[in-house]
Amino acid sequence: MGLITIELDLKAVKREPKKQATAPLLRSPSLHQSNHVAIASTNRLKYCSHNELRKISCKVERGVLIIYGQVSSFYWKQLAQEIIRPISQSLLIENQLEVRSETLNET
């Protein structure tokens, strides 16, 4: 038996556009990029139109964007996370916001 070789004319092969992956690729951003994301996230909350979210801060540790501070309800906790999600890039978000319990002083 003889060997069969197939030669392809690469110019003749129709190339399909690359398809986007359905899930984002998780890559480890550089330290500089991480600091930039933390600062941008904090600033987005600081200049937010909701007073409740202006004292929240963000930092990046080991490739995770951490939100920390205090809010008065779980609504604000979730909203803060969703506000920074578009700029979090490939970082995971860890929401460490504490929900203050509003207790009435009984005397």
Image: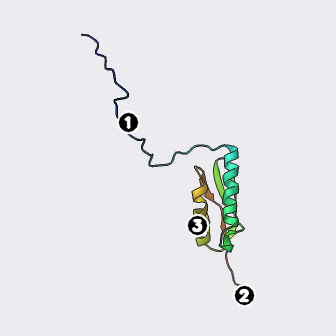
Foreground label between 1 and 3: 1
Q: Residue at x 58, y 72 (%)?
A: 75
Q: Residue at x 72, y 87 (%)?
A: 106
Q: Which mark is residue 90?
A: none
User: Image check: 39 left or right of 77?
Assistant: right
Query: Considering the image in quadrants, where does the C terminus appear?
Result: bottom right
Residue 14 position within the rendered picture, expressed as x and y whole percent measured from the top left: 35, 35
* Amino acid type shown at disc 1: Arg
**Label 1 Cα crowd, 10 Å radius (few <14 / some 14-19 / many 20+):** few
Residue 64 position within the rendered picture, expressed as x and y whole percent measured from the top left: 63, 51
In terms of sequence position, does the residue under pointer 1 or pointer 2 come before the other? Answer: 1
CB under 8 Å between discs 1 and 2: no
SS state under label 2: loop
Instruction: Report how far apart the C-alphas of labels 1 and 2 lie in the structure.
Output: 74 Å
Question: Taking 51 as reference, is 87 above or below it?
Answer: above
Question: Taking 69 as reference, is 6 above or below it?
Answer: above
Q: Number of labelled discs?
A: 3
Q: Which mark is residue 15?
A: 1
Give the labeled residue for mark 2: 106
* Residue extending farthest right: 107
**Label 3 Cα crowd, 10 Å radius (few <14 / some 14-19 / many 20+):** few
* Amino acid type shown at disc 3: Gln
Which quadrant holds residue 55?
Answer: bottom right
Q: Residue at x 64, y 54 (%)?
A: 65
Instruction: Report how far apart the C-alphas of labels 2 and 3 lie in the structure.
Output: 31 Å
In terms of sequence position, does the residue under pointer 1 or pointer 3 come before the other? Answer: 1
User: Image check: 59 left or right of 83?
Assistant: right
SS state under label 3: helix
Which quadrant holds residue 17?
Answer: top left
Give the labeled residue for mark 3: 78
